[in-house]
């Protein structure tokens, strides 16, 4: 698992480590890792023009010491001091290595930038965001915001130190102006904003520098390929189609017959042995035409996937009966309308997009999109369900309080029917015996992996994603174990 910790957890771990190390050791570890990452990002160091935006916190010190190391290797490093309170020893080290300060003590322009600073930023090869660190609040002060805007206007890439300044670190929210980084270099562990949108998008790729922190249980986890391999229900020699799992699929309607075909495609690409389709005869014919192995009609199943494309054919009473049975149930799209907060639903998985979750919670969609982690957790607690909130980063929240995210999806996956494939796949994983949290986690990962194969950097369709699921799964299961086990 890739793990993300809260600000308080990181602060406590840092304080414990600093108490056992010579003064300044931790900052030097961070600065060294940052300097190497910047050099690798640029592809060279000698002659590179580097501008450091320096605030009052320790991450400004990290940036200054990194600048010193780059200057000693031939980079032209300029510090822009955005606060009267900066790390003086780090600045002295930078100046001794040949770096300089831009605009110090000079008059400011209309944007609040010291004279000449805008030109320094515009000519830079890279800007380093050392404005505020993990202790900062959302938003940027006027001079910092002006400097960041100049970099954006001149397309100068920004490397963020630890986190992009201005984002909310513990929620992933971006309610105010903030840095949008081409690369974020973080220390010790990932932070929540690195994994949860909208802040995750502002981070760009995240490079983790190990500085030796001893950390507690993570607030959020991101499943990786080794975790999927460990969880995936691989059939054994004695398995048959029933022991592998049978999924009951209630999807599609006269309005949306294609949803049933697409969801079935996702389900069949999972680990189960059989799918029972329950729905209108005309839709069943379309499903059987695409997948002749499907059994139409009710019978014994190990899990249900309900809702994709039901439209006006949604039978609330029938779905609520299923929720009272012992088999786990996945609710997608229209099926989510059957959910209420009056029962015990800890074996239920729901797979809404932001609009569907907003309707369930009776809030505006924009509110959910701006506070994805908050509303996924709120829904899981209120309705006692596991929530897979679809989006550019998928947030999965369990009623136990556990949260996982999936970050490996391509933006091309935002296409009609992709959610139906995911619902079928996750339902298949439930029927094969995974609990809702693991089914959602494995399903989201494989769905994104298949989309990456189908896309290859370009457009895709939902059925192409479903068709690539076996390849994605096969490739992942065949990956060598890095531990050699």
Image: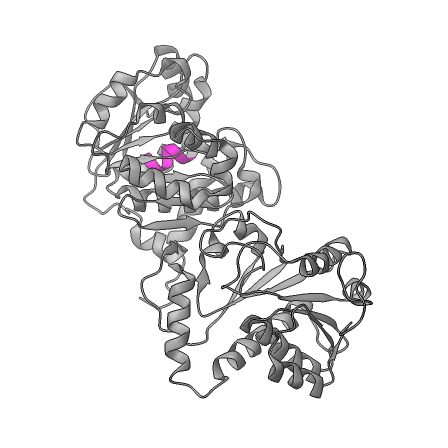
- Residue 75: which quarter of the image? bottom right
Q: Is residue 420 visible?
A: no
Q: Is residue 462 visible?
A: yes
424 inside magenta stretch: yes
Pick the front one: 437 or 218:
218
Q: Where residue 206 sits in the image (x, y, percent)?
A: 54, 61
227 relative position to 418: left or right: left
Task: Tell me: residue 206, above or below residue 49.
Answer: above
**Chief secondary structure of the magenta span?**
helix
Q: How is the image coloured?
A: one colour
Q: Residue at x 56, y 71 (%)?
A: 57
59 relative position to 308: left or right: right
Q: Residue at x 44, y 46 (%)?
A: 472
Pick the front one: 7 or 345:
7
Q: Where residue 38 sits in the image (x, y, percent)?
A: 63, 70
Q: Where residue 122 sits in the image (x, y, percent)?
A: 79, 62
Quadrant the C terminus occupies: bottom left
Pick the front one: 278 or 471:
278
Quadrant the N terminus occupies: bottom left
Q: Residue at x 50, y 46 (%)?
A: 409
Q: Where residue 312 sits in the image (x, y, percent)?
A: 40, 13
137 inside magenta stretch: no
Instruction: Please give the range of residues in magenta.
Output: 422-427
246 relative position to 288: left or right: left
């Amino acid at each position: 698992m890739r793990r993300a910790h809260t600000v308080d957890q990181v602060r406590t771990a840092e304080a414990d480590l600093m108490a056992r190390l010579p003064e300044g050791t931790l900052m030097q570890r961070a600065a060294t890792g940052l300097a190497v990452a910047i050099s690798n990002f640029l592809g060279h160091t000698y002659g590179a023009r580097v501008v450091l935006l320096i605030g009052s916190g320790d991450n400004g010190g990290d940036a200054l010491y990194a600048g010193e190391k780059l200057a000693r290797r031939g980079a032209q490093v300029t510090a822009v001091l955005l606060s009267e309170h900066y790390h003086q020893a780090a600045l002295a080290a930078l100046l001794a290595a040949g770096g300089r300060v831009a605009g110090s003590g000079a008059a400011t322009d209309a944007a609040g930038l010291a004279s000449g600073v805008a030109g320094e930023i515009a000519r830079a090869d890279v800007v380093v965001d050392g404005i505020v660190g993990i202790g900062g609040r959302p938003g940027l002060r006027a001079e910092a915001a002006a400097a960041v805007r100049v970099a954006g206007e001149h397309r100068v890439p920004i490397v963020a130190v630890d986190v992009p300044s201005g984002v909310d670190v513990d929620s992933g929210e971006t309610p105010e102006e903030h840095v949008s980084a081409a690369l974020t270099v973080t220390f010790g562990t990932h932070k929540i904003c690195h994994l949860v949108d909208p802040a995750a998008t502002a981070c760009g790729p995240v490079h983790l520098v190990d500085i030796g922190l001893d950390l507690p249980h993570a607030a959020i986890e991101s499943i990786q390929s080794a975790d999927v391999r460990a969880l995936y229900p691989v059939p054994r020699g004695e398995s048959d189609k029933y022991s592998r799992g049978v999924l009951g699929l209630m999807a599609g309607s006269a309005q949306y017959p294609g949803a049933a075909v697409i969801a079935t495609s996702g389900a069949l690409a999972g680990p189960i042995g059989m799918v029972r389709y329950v729905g209108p005869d005309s839709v069943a014919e379309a499903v059987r035409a695409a997948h002749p192995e499907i059994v139409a009609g009710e019978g014994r199943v190990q899990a249900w996937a309900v809702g994709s494309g039901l439209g006006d054919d949604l039978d609330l009473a029938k779905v609520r009966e299923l929720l009272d049975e012992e088999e786990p149930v996945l609710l997608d799209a229209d099926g989510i309308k059957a959910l209420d907060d009056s029962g015990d639903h800890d074996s239920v998985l729901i797979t809404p997009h932001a609009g569907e979750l907003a309707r369930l919670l009776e809030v505006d969609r924009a509110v959910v999109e701006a506070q994805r982690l908050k509303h996924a957790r709120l829904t899981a607690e209120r309705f006692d369900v596991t929530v897979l909130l679809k989006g550019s980063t998928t947030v999965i929240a369990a009623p136990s309080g556990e949260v996982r995210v999936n970050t490996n999806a391509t933006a091309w996956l935002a296409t009609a029917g992709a959610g139906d494939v995911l619902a079928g796949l996750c339902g298949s994983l439930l029927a094969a015996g995974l609990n809702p949290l693991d089914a959602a986690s494995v399903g989201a990962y494989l769905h994104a992996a298949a989309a990456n194969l189908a896309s290859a950097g370009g457009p895709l369709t939902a059925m192409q994603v479903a068709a690539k699921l076996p390849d994605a799964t096969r490739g992942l299961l065949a990956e060598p174990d890095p531990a050699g086990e």
